[in-house]
Amino acid sequence: MRGVGVSSGAVTVVNALATGIGCAVAISLPVRVDLELRRADGIGSHRIQLERGSDTPLVRETLDTGLSLYAPGEVFSGELRVDSHVPVGKGLKSSSAVGGAVLRAVADTLRQPRPPEELARLAADIAQQIGLSATGAYDDCLAALRGGVVLTDNAHRTALRAAPFDSDLCVVLWIPPESHAPSTTWYERFQLETEAGRAVVEAARAGRWTEAMTLNTELVERVVGYDYRPLRSDLLRAGAVMCGVSGMGPALAAFVPRSGVESVVPRLPTDRGEVRVVDIRPEDGTSMEES
C-alpha cells in the first residue's frame, strides 16, 4: 500500500503564546511525505524504514500514533520519506507542516481520508506532548493542512475563523541564519503579555489582519528581543501592505502586491539572510510551487 501526504509552511499573524488564540496564513513552502506499508505477520512494533534526514522524534511519534489510531492492532513494515521545503527553526511552521503531512500520508495509505481539522488536532496534540510546542500550535497545523488563513483557539482545538486570504498578494520572506528556541522556552514570558495579546486577537477576530500582524510583531519583538522596526518601516514604505515576525522568528514576512515585489526585495539585507518569494496557498490548494 502506498500513500502521499502534503501540507505547507505558514506565516504567523497572531502568536498564540500570549492568549492561547493563534492565527496563521498558509504559504507555498511545500511538504510531501511518501509512505509505503506492508502488513507484517505476528505482533510487535512497526518496522518502518525512514530515509536519512526524515528520522526525527516528531516523525517517529507521529507515524506510530497515526498507525495505532487508524490501524489498531496491526503491524507494518515499510518505508517513509519526508521532502520538506520549510526551513527548520525559523518560525515558518516546519514541525506543524511535517506532522500534518505524515498523518495525511498514513490516512491516505490506509485508504482512510480524514478532514484537515482532525489531522491538525492530532498533530497539535503530538507536538505538545513531545515538547515541541507550548500550545500545540493548532493554528499552524490547520493552516498547513487546509490553506488560507485560520484563527483558532489552541487550548480547545477549535477554529474560530477559516477563510481564503488575498490571492493578489504574495509573501516575501527574509530568513536569517539563526534558529529560534522552542516555544516552550518562552511561554512564561509571553504569559506576561496577555493583556497586549488580547488586543492582537481582537484585531484578528475583526479581520484586521494588518493591525493584528503589526501588534503581534511588536509583542514578539519585546519578548524575544528582535529589533525589526526600522526594517519593517522600510518595507512598508517600499510597498508591503503588512509585515512582521513569523512565529518565534527569526524569519520576517512581508505581504506584498505582485507588482511591488521588485521594490520590496532590494530593501532586505541579503548579506544577513536569505530572501524567498512565495505565494499564499489557497484553501485546500495543492499547488505549492515557490515563485
Image (spheres, rainbow, N blue to C red):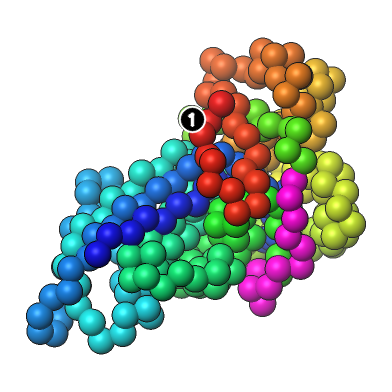
Instruction: Indicate left or right for 210 with 93 as reference.
Output: right
Mark yes or no: residue 252 visible: no
Q: Nearer the viewer, residue 132 or 24?
A: 24
Mark yes or no: residue 205 visible: yes
Q: Secondary structure at mark 1?
A: loop
Residue lying at 24% horizontally and 64% vertically, measured from the top left:
1
Q: Position of residue 17 (x, y in %)?
A: 67, 61
Determine which quarter of the picture holds residue 84.
top left
Assess whether residue 59 is covered by the magenta stretch: no
* Residue underneath mark 1: 177
Q: Nearer the viewer, residue 59 or 284?
A: 284
Height in image: 74 above or below 96? below
Q: Nearer the viewer, residue 6 or 220?
A: 6
Instruction: Indicate left or right for 279 with 103 as reference.
Output: right
Q: Position of residue 283 (x, y in %)?
A: 65, 52
Residue lying at 70% horizontally and 57% vertically, measured from the top left:
150
Indicate the amino acid at tag 1: Pro
Residue lying at 33% horizontally and 71% vertically, measured from the top left:
110
Residues in magenta, as a range: 154-165
Assess whether residue 163 is covered by the magenta stretch: yes
